[in-house]
Amino acid sequence: MSVKDMLQDMVSKGATDIIFSTGSAPAGRFGGRLLPYNQDKFPAELLNKMVFDVMMNEEQRTRFEMTGEMDLTVNLAGVGRFRANVYRQRGELAVAFRTIMSRIPSLTELELPESVRRLLDFPDGLILVAGPSDSGRTTTVASMLDHVNNTRECHIVTVEDPVEFIHTTRKSLISQRELGRDTASYASALKVILKQAPDVVFIDEMPDLETIVGVLKLAETGHLVITTVPARTSGQAVDRLINLFPPYQQQQIRTQLAMTLRGVIAQQLLPGVSDAQRVAAREVLIAAPPIVSLIQEGKTHLIPNVVAQGGALGMIAMDEHLRQLAEAGRIAPRVAMARATDSAKMVDAQRGQADLANLEKALYDPSADRRKAAELELQKLASTGNKGASEILEQFARFYQTNFDDKKIGVRR
C-alpha cells in the first residue's frame, strides 16, 4: 500500500495526525489517541519517493538537505489537504502530517461564544488566541477570519508558516503570505505591511521580540491584529508576552499591551466521551477596565479572579467551562480534573454539584420533613449567591404552583 493510500484510509477513519517514520509502523491520532495503523515497518524507499518526488520541488529539496527539516502544505487529489513537517530522526526520513479541514467551520459550529464575535467588530486592537500544540488554534483563527471575510468590507493580510486554510475573497479582500515563499520572515513582513493597506492582520506566530514589538505597534496604529500564543490560559498568555522582554522593558510592554488588548481566547482539545471525537474547552478574557488595570500594574496573577467573575461581560474561566462540559456529559469528570488549572477547586465544585443534586431530589421526597429541610438548605445556599441553588428553587416553585396547593408541601405555608 502506498503512502497516499494509507493517508486516504486514515483520513476516512477520522485521523487528525498521521506519522510516517522509516523503520517504524505508521501511526494515526484518533480522538486524541495515537494508534498504530499496522505492524509493518515502513520502508525507506516508499517514504523517500513520496517526499522527494511528490511533496517537494527542487528548491525545497535543496533547503531540506541543508537544514534537515521542512514545513509545507500538501494537496493530494482525492485525499485532502495537509500541513506536513518533514524531518530526520536517527539519520532516516520521517513525516508528520496534520489534516486540514476541507471547509472552514463557522463560529457557531465551533461553539465560540457571542463575546468572540463581538471582538471581531473592533476596528483595531489585539486579539490573542492561546493554547498548547494541537489545541485547534489554527482552526479557531480560520473561523474568525472567515467571519470577518463574510461580514466586513476590508483588506485582510495574513503571514503564515505555512498557509493552511485557503480563504477566498467575499466581502473582504484577503492576501495570504507564506514564510519562505512570499516573505523572508515575520519581522520583514511587518516592516512593509502598512504599505499593503491592511485593516485586519493575522500573524500566526511571534517567534522573537522584534515580531512582538511589530505586532503591538500595528495594533496601536488602527489595525485589528490576531495572533497566537502557546499558553494554556488567558493570564498565562499575557504573562508570556510580557516576560519575554528584559525587565527594563516590561513596564513599557505592559502599558502597550493594556492599551491594545481586546481579548484572549485560550483553548485546549480534550478526548470526548466517544473515542472518535475531541471537545474544545475554552477560556475567554475580555479586556474590560479591571483587566486593563491589572496588566498596567503588573498584577496579572489576579487575572483569573476577574475572568471567573466576568460572566456578564462574556468572560468564562477555563475551569468553569471544563466543569460545564463534564456536567453535560461531553467529557469525563477525570478529564476535567486532569486539565483544570486548580484541580482542588474542581473537585470541590463537582462535590458541590453532587450535593445540589441530592438536595433537589429531596425536594420531591414523600417525607414532608425531608422536603422542608432540603428547601431551607437550598434557600441558605441561594442567599450566598449559589446560582445552582437558585435555579433549583425557581424550578421547584414552578412545579409547586402547577401541581400542589400551599398546604401540601415543604415550608410553603
Image (spheres, rainbow, N blue to C red):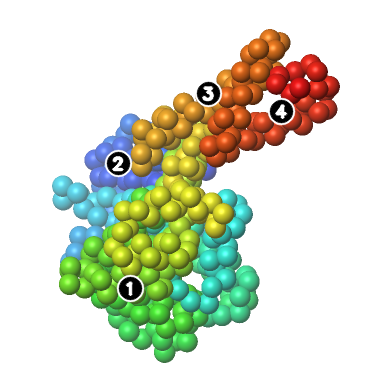
Locate residue 242, reporting x and y percent: 27, 65
Q: Residues within 10 Å of mark 4 (few under 14, many from 20)?
A: some
Question: What's the CA distance linking mark 2 and mark 3?
Answer: 54 Å
Q: Amino acid at mark 1?
A: Thr
Are dots 4 and 2 in contact, CB under 8 Å? Answer: no
Instruction: First in sequence, mark 2 or 3: give its number.
Output: 2
Question: What's the CA distance linking mark 4 and mark 3?
Answer: 16 Å
Q: Amino acid at mark 2?
A: Phe
Can you identify the residue that label 1 sits on? Answer: 255
In the picture, which quadrant includes the N terminus?
top left
Residue found at the very far front of the displayed protein: 413
Task: Quadrant for residue 407, please give it.
Answer: top right
Q: Nearer the viewer, residue 317 or 183?
A: 317
Locate residue 334, reporting x and y percent: 41, 29
Can you identify the residue that label 2 sits on? Answer: 42
Q: Residues within 10 Å of mark 3 (few under 14, many from 20)?
A: few
Instruction: First in sequence, mark 3 or 1: give its number.
Output: 1
Can you identify the residue that label 3 sits on? Answer: 355
Question: What's the CA distance linking mark 4 and mark 2?
Answer: 63 Å
Numbered disc 2: secondary structure: loop
Residue at position x 17%, y 69% from top? 246
Numbered disc 4: secondary structure: helix
Which tag is nearer the camera, tag 4 or tag 2? 4
Numbered disc 3: secondary structure: helix
Q: Nearer the viewer, residue 296 or 147?
A: 296
In the picture, which quadrant includes the C terminus?
top right
Residue at position x 45%, y 53% from top? 307
Q: Is residue 63 visible?
A: no
